[in-house]
Image (cartoon, grey):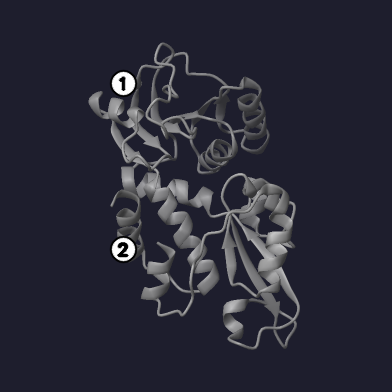
Amino acid sequence: MQNAGLATLGLNWRYLAFEVQPKDLREAIAGARAMKLIGLNLTVPHKLLAFEIVDVLDESAKAWGAVNTIRFEGKDEQGQWQPLKFFADDVPREIRSHGFNTDAEAIVLSLQEDLQFKVKGASVLVLGAGGAGRVAALKLAAEGVAALFLVNRTASKAEAVAAEIRQRFPGVAVSADYPKNPRADLLLNATSLGLQARDPSPLEETRFPIRGAKFVYDMIYRPAETPLLRMAKAAGCRTANGLGMLLYQGAKALELWTGQPAPLKGMRAALERNVYG
């Protein structure tokens, strides 16, 4: 996806994947800065760790408490911090790491573009209150949902996210449980259940029948259709998987590094080829 975007933009860059253990993350970020890399993307479990490591946090990272994108920046002749892209080969010695979060915005964009779902005023049931579930719930609250229902295997995690939402977004009705009336405009799966064929359902169907949701969104994108989405389709729900979220968070990261609009069409095509063959 990113290399397709870079090629379309005519940039002689390469996007590469590296496996880094959590205990080595600080050293890895320092090494990338020393090598004058343009930037980094981070996946779990590094997003929360990086929040404490980067030199400066963008408002997006502060708002959601996680960093999934780093942009390295240098000081120009006027003493202003600029992305390394703007220094060509004359990169200054003083470089800092700037942390961003592009996940939250990507969730809402994918819901709008892939499901034509209107967030404002909706009722949403979120399965999972870990890193992805927490960011999704907070972003949905910020976008003006009317009601949020948070369900997690460890109930205390759902309670903690619910308490945070009550404090930050008091206008949103939030509960750390399934809705008593089993109805919601959107059911969003932010758990990893569905990645493996033998996984149990993330949804307690005795508490919430799938037909109680008008829209069902699963953050998992491989497989393309999880058992949850298959069940939702059979029940007549409108469905989408997490491929759009992956696309939009990556596109925003590319824009942060390059200062140019991301070529979404080509990036989506490359992503679909890579993920689905």
In the rendered structure, find residue 82 and report the number of the disc placed on it. Answer: none
The image position of residue 259, as x and y in percent, is: 51, 74
Residue at position x 73%, y 57% in the image: 26
Quadrant of the snapshot with the N terminus: bottom left
Residue at position x 43%, y 22% in the image: 200
In the rendered structure, find residue 211 and report the number of the disc placed on it. Answer: 1
Residue at position x 30%, y 60% in the image: 269
Secondary element type, mark 2: helix
The image position of residue 110, as x and y in percent, is: 39, 48
Q: Is residue 262 visible?
A: no
The image position of residue 239, as x and y in percent, is: 31, 36
Give the alpha-carbon distance from disc 2 to disc 1, as whole Å: 33 Å
Q: Nearer the viewer, mark 2 or mark 1?
A: 2
What's under tag 2, amino acid-wise? Answer: Lys
User: Which of the 4 image quarters holds residue 172?
Assistant: top right
Residue at position x 67%, y 64% in the image: 98
Q: Residue furthest top?
A: 206
Q: Is residue 238 above or below residue 50?
A: above
- Find disc 2 in the rendering and name its residue: 265
Left or right placement of residue 262 versus residue 66 in this view:
left
Q: Is residue 14 visible?
A: yes
What's under tag 1, amino acid-wise? Answer: Arg
Query: Do the CB atoms of the residues marked 2 and 1 lie less than 8 Å apart?
Result: no
Left or right placement of residue 124 versus residue 99 in this view:
left
In depth, the one of 154 and 141 nearer the eye is 154
User: Which of the 4 image quarters holds residue 117?
Assistant: top left
Secondary element type, mark 1: helix
